[in-house]
Image: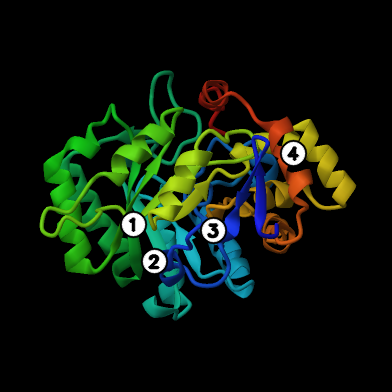
Amino acid sequence: PGPFFMRKGLVVATAALSTSSMALEMIPGCRMGLGLAALGRPGYINLGRDRDLEEDRSEGAMRARAFEVLDAAWSRGVRWFDAARSYGLAEQFLGDYLRERGIAPSEVFVSSKWGYRYAADWKVDLTPGAAHEVKDHSLAHLRSQLRDTEAALGDYVRLYQIHSATFESGVLENREVLNELAALKKRNNWKIGLSVSSPQQAEVLRAALAVRCPEDGSRLFDSCQVTYNVLEQAPFDVLLEAHQAGLLIIVKEALANGRALTAAPLVATAETLNVTPDSLALAAVLAAPFRPHVLSGAVTSAQLDSNFQAAALAETLDPELLAALLRDCRQDSHTYWADRADLKWN
């Protein structure tokens, strides 16, 4: 949105912000990619999933849908795909797709994550108290999930991330795990990142910025994957810090699992601009001065097409209009995460 960005009544000179050379090296071209959280398993918490997917959620049906959307993404020039061990069969679907289409590892950027185990046994409705995902940030789990990731994705992986690092899991203080990640970074020539969640995203990310590799004292983490959208804007300041420090900034849940699309100020502004609400919500994130790379969670080709209109829209958004939109949509962070916790798997 030009060289300036409005924030809390202040104007931030985006031209003065450093651009991460590592980020450009990692994911060239368009700053949008496709995340497979909603394509690799039958259930997820995104709103409207029953409308977007057919009744058949078998492995074969979800694989076919994943391939359909991956084909649509590839034809649009998308070369970045994000998965995780806990996304059901997302890693397997993605690896199979890339091999079957004859796509070489040098042609694509794949990021994945370890730390959560998929536990839903390909079901949507679980017995009360049962979890779809189980977190385990132990060294044994890292090693086990790393073997699974390498089996599914092989040489395609270029970024491996801790899935949902928190203070409670202790992963940022687990020297065994951190040393293993540092060794993996050197051995496989992978970038190492982390994703964060909860109202403590900023605090966890600041702690991660201080983690160093044991051999040379260099920073361990090359990237962070953060929830940031028109509703949840609390991480803004720390994302500026991380960007200036050279981290690749990845934004997940830029549509707030669909909740952003019902925010009245967003809907009204989209109508005024004659654009779709999803493209505007994504453009508002892309326009941030920390230059994020943003994941689409599309599960249909039509959603993908609409989502990717955001890239061009972000370049033309009026800064004052954007500032007003962010001001009017913003939620309290604790309220945002409490509402997210209430979303039902569907």
**How far is disc 4 from disc 1 in space, using C-alphas?**
31 Å
Pointer 2 residue: 22
Q: Is residue 313 found left or right of 38 in the rendered image? A: right
**How far is disc 1 from disc 2 in space, using C-alphas?**
8 Å
Q: Where is residue 16 in the image (x, y as percent from the top left)?
A: 54, 58
**How far is disc 4 from disc 2 in space, using C-alphas?**
31 Å
- Between 283 and 258, the one lying in front of the other is 283
| Residue at image point 33% right, 57% down | 222
First reached walking from the N terminus: tag 4 or tag 1: 1
User: Could you tell me if the residues under marks 4 and 2 are in contact, i.e. CB atoms within 8 Å?
Assistant: no
First reached walking from the N terminus: tag 2 or tag 3: 3
Q: What element carries label 2?
A: helix
Is residue 27 depicted above or below 298 in this figure?
below
Pointer 3 residue: 16
Choose mark 3 or mark 1, whichever is in front: 3
- Between 338 and 319, the one lying in front of the other is 319
Q: Where is residue 89 in the image (x, y as percent from the top left)?
A: 41, 52
* Residue 115 shows up from this direction: no
| Disc 1 crowd, CA 10 A, few/some/many (<14, 14-19, 20+) | many
Pointer 1 residue: 222
Q: Is residue 82 found left or right of 322 in the rendered image? A: left
Find residue 115 and report its image quarter: top left
